[in-house]
Image (spheres, grey):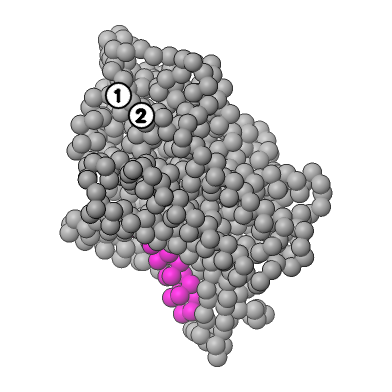
Amino acid sequence: MITEKPDQQRADEADQPYISPQTKLPELTIKAVLLGAALSVVLSAANAYFGLFAGLTVSASIPAAVISMAILRLFRNSNILENNLVQTAASAGESLAAGVIFTIPALVIMGYWNEFNYWETTLIALTGGVLGILFTIPLRNALIVKEKLTFPEGLATAEVLKTGEAGGKSIKFLLWGGLVGGLFKISEAVLNIWQGTFEKAALLNNKIYLYVGLNLSPALVAVGYIVGLNIAFLVFLGGVISWYVAIPAYVATVGPPAGVTDPEAMGITIWSGQIRYLGVGAMVVGGLWALINLRSSLSTALKSGVEAFKAGSDQLKNRLRTEMDTPMSWVLIGIGVLIVPVFVIYLREIEQVTITGLMAVIMVIAGFLFSAVAGYMAGLVGSSNNPISGVTIATILASALLLAALMGTADPGRGAAAAILVGAVVCCAAAIAGDNMQDLKAGYILGATPYKQQVMQVVGVAAGAFAIAPVLNYLLLGYGMGAPTDAQPNALAAPQATLMQSVAVGIFGGGLPWNMVAIGAVIAAVVIAIDVRLEKKKSNFRMPVLAVAVGIYLPLELDTSIFIGGLLAWAVNKYFKRQSVNGASESHALSQDKAGKAGLLLASGLITGEALMGILIAVGIVVSDLGQLQVFEQPIGDGYLGLAMLGLVIFGIYWAITRTYQQEKK
């Protein structure tokens, strides 16, 4: 929602860093390391909860930058480059959480693990995350310096940091959003004043299935607001394909599932057992399409890496401060060292040295390729819209098929777990790559020293990796994960991890509905064809296939809430356009920029506040051993009260943004 300048103007500004290469400021300080590590832990925990709940994550670079500025302003000698390093570490931990929660919970959901084993979880997250950092080092010069990709969140983060006074004033929006998000979560999960979902379903004549669902979460609305109407609509379109086309068609042709009479349960049963696999086919095709589109960029990145390696340390010493990446010799040594723990983890599951070595090599190759895809896509559409799910499902599908051919299917649990572990390392690497490229873009604009940013990325990954397992265990004990049960009615859905588990187990157990996967692949091909047509027409509206695929495998209640957030973003933009007619363009642009940042921080606060409160509630449930912390036995108003309160929050966001615009314009 932050107003962007024209691409060419952005490019010109990026060629002249905010801090010149000749200027040396304290960057990698002790307080920056400590604050960056602390924020990494907090934001990775918040993202872990929200991703397990909603199946989506958003970039935390801007909230981290605002928090960093507010805290570092208390110190006399802080500066913009130091602030940039803090947000770099913080956002690294946040993006690592996405890689972890999309894959590792599958081991628990399938019953292979009873809990999140601390050292295995930590080691997978740490090795995958650091590999993602190492893979992005040659990509920085190729995608940021040479190809000059936009990296929208990196640009926005740089703008927030350049308006240094925003750290003291704008943090109030982040705090207000966090307070509202936390109170909303308490009202639903602890007080039980209203239920978390508003849904109605009906089955007419045992043939016609109707369903309406809306998750009453301000955080989901905030996600839609951040990604904008285009992406939010595509996510909702995926839900429409599943719930208004595929499920009714299934009921009309096959009939309702045996023994299921409740219409709401009927839809979930059909969706979880059959229809969501449309998303698998769509994501695999989408991931392959991304690789095809990036073949020239991958070649450029590889050439840049080879050139940097040939340059040697002597030539690196003569480079400007703003061009000094971590030496390629260190990168290659680091990759070689990190293969060792990955090999050991795989060997414990596969128990065959030759196959383990082959899977480790495949992991490295897939990790680099998909890190490049994630980095390139982050440059085009931002980290929040990155195809992490698509590349991970493609990795797990390919790994499972290969392992099934090499190992056989006599021990399906072990084979499926091995495939998921391969996907977990690749997913962590790809998740880190996309977000870190945004941070490196911000550093490129600001005049940061690249190798110092890369050091702080390692700090953020390490802090997040060592903290993620206890957070996941508290969430597992407090809520449960996967499909809701009578014992755990509020289980976190973990959509991606559930899907990864279903694919891996389905290949080894023979229960994967390949017809649905094939239909999903056809749907993806149609979406790609439409998007290619839109690109040729230079349309402002685009159809990235993975956004539709995400919507297909998310429950409709989540898709609908995200779409409402997209509509809110559209309404705010319409307001700005109406106001631009009445005022000077420069005054309007400045006011719109301040108001847009306020809206972004409010939305980020809603997500963070709800997520952190969800974690605290889980800790309370575990510590108190009560099972639930609900005050009232029955929600009030059959969902309508929660619907009204969500409407009030949406109106409040719109009012706060428009009021900020009017105040800044005076």
Q: Which residue is mark 1?
A: 18
Residue 361: where, in percent of width, then height?
A: 45, 35
Q: Quadrant location of residue 104?
A: top right
- Point 30% across, 28% down: residue: 445
Tag 1 or tag 2, which sits nearer the N-term?
1
Specify the segment rendered in magenta. Answer: 230-250
Q: Outermost residue toward the front? A: 666
Q: Quadrant location of residue 380?
A: top left
Q: Which residue is mark 2?
A: 162
The amino acid type found where label 2 is placed reads Lys
- Point 39% across, 52% down: residue: 658
The amino acid type found where label 1 is placed reads Tyr
Is 176 part of what is drawn in magenta?
no
Q: How packed is label 2: few (under 14 Cα within 10 Å), some, or many (20 or more)?
A: some
Up-down relation of residue 26 to residue 230 (above or below): above
- At mark 1, the secondary structure is loop
- Point 55% across, 41% down: residue: 175
Asked whether 162 or 153 is in front, the reply is 162
Asked whether 319 or 304 is in front, the reply is 319
Q: How packed is label 1: few (under 14 Cα within 10 Å), some, or many (20 or more)?
A: some
Asked whether 324 or 634 is in front, the reply is 634
Up-down relation of residue 573 to residue 33 (above or below): below
